[in-house]
Amino acid sequence: MTSQNPSTRRRYAVAGLGHRSHMYVDAILGDHADVAELAAFCEPNRGRAAVYTDLAAERGRPGVPTYAPADLEQMITAEHVDTLIVTTPDATHADLVARALRAGADVVVEKPLTTTAQGCRTITDAVAETSRSVVMTFNYRYAPRNSELRRVIASGEIGEVTSVHFEWVLDSVHGADYFRRWHRLKDVSGGLLVHKSSHHFDLVSWWIADAPTRVYARGGLKVYGDTSPVAREMAERDAAAGLPPRPARGTGSADGTRGWEGRAGDRWALDLRADERLKALYLDAEHHDGYVRDQDVFSAGITIEDNLALLVDYERGATLTYSLNAHGPWEGYRVSVNGTKGRAELEVVERGSVELDERGRSILDPSANPGAWEGDDVRPFGDRLVVQKHWGRAREVPIPAGIGGHGGGDAILLQDVFRAPVEGARHDPLGRAAGYLDGVRAVAVGISGNASLASGQPVDVADLGLGVSISVPWPPERPAGAGSAEPVVAPHDAHPTPTSDPAGATA
């Protein structure tokens, strides 16, 4: 794309200054400062904007201007923005992406691409009109364990894929957090099938080089919310102890760590004062817009599910069985891929249990306090990829060590985001860089799943009217791996011609 910026560095603006945006701001001001320049922020909350402008000033970039979302086009023009990075709540993505493209900027967007079929059409129309670039940041593709599974499947070692089983477990720290914040509202996040599971559905499409065609979903809110058995049991216990009803939010304990309203050690609560960053971004900023980041997970008003199960058909005949649980005692995932020549199994333990530190707080990051999990020989932290062909013994596939968040994927992803050659994506035998069409494939499963949950019936993806064909060219060219010939990268989806919406398509 032709840059609006006469400098050799591309100018980036970041829209949405919550917790996730820190990774991009840090990268622009740090490891990628030689090729990237922070041009502006787009954020309606003055408190959060101040946190990031102060951060930028401390890192040598004072005076970064902040614009309101309504002034996005003015910002792109006035600040000579080459690329907009979108990290706003999910339901706002489609509007911001389309407006940025039409204003003359390329876009990098956090998953999910959008939350509805209408959002997909909004983006695909803008891409077709402008021919500008939309990069999806599917960081799990870059995690070495997931990349190695892709290599095994694409090598042909297990033959043609017939089925995939994918089980993801969110523990009672990470999983519960989706029920405290804006993600708890399906009209904002699309529910976990869109917000969280789009990661997983993208992995499946990428692993097997195929596109979903039909989805049947079941699920519900079974643990969180005010009517669950867990909520009822706690309410009865609190009443017996003479405690008042649970507060609407978690912040308010005496020491910021051990619960509130006399509920010492309430592990379901989040006190924002216990984390300086969360306090600055949310508690200190909430008077600007009223957004409460620490809502009680057992309060009323939650419209998303915490237990989900899907059956997904793919174009070339493979079937995915998928489950997501958001209240497990451990966190990680298991994937089994069955093929005509054998089977591949990936097991990942991201956190073997929920441990508490000396102040009674849940330890979120195993790498920050590895000693907390010492001695757990039953469910040790780590990953394992096993491949077994018919009539042969199983072999373990070595997984390279990763560095940083999301299984080592974030650091490698940022290389592609900020250092991709001007003429296009770099040579990558695994095809990890993702475009908007990959984003449409991923949310197509979640959007169809939500429709199936509502109707109780299977949903054909074609009936959504996504505005573009999501078929994957076949046969794909294979990355290097066992049993493969010299590989060449399959051409990445660029800008397929959008299709007209079928009659009666609904978002």
Image: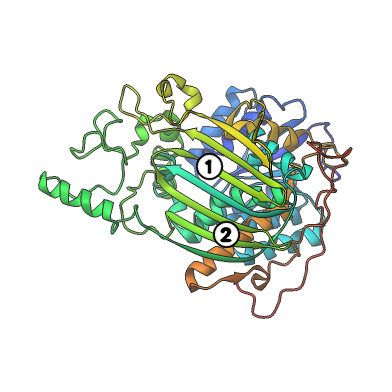
Amino acid type assigned to the residue bearing label 1 in the image: Tyr
Residue 75: which numbered mark, if any? none
Q: Residue at x 43, y 55 (%)?
A: 307
In the drawing, does residue 229 fall left or right of residue 133? left
Q: Nearer the viewer, residue 40 or 15?
A: 15
Callout 2 secondary element: helix
Q: Is residue 108 visible?
A: no
- Asked whether the residues under the numbered discs 1 and 2 touch, taking CB atoms below 8 Å apart as contact, a structural biologist would say no
Q: Nearer the viewer, residue 379 or 338?
A: 338
| Residue on which disc 2 sits | 446
Q: CA distance from mark 1 to mark 2?
A: 18 Å
* Label 1 packing within 10 angstroms: few (<14), some (14-19), many (20+): some
In the drawing, does residue 360 fall left or right of residue 214? left
| Residue on which disc 1 sits | 333
Q: Nearer the viewer, residue 223 or 264?
A: 223
Residue 236 at x, y percent in the picture: 16, 51
Callout 1 secondary element: strand
Q: Residue at x 24, y 30 (%)?
A: 254
The tag earlier along the polypeptide, 1 or 2, is: 1
Residue 199 at x, y percent in the picture: 60, 48
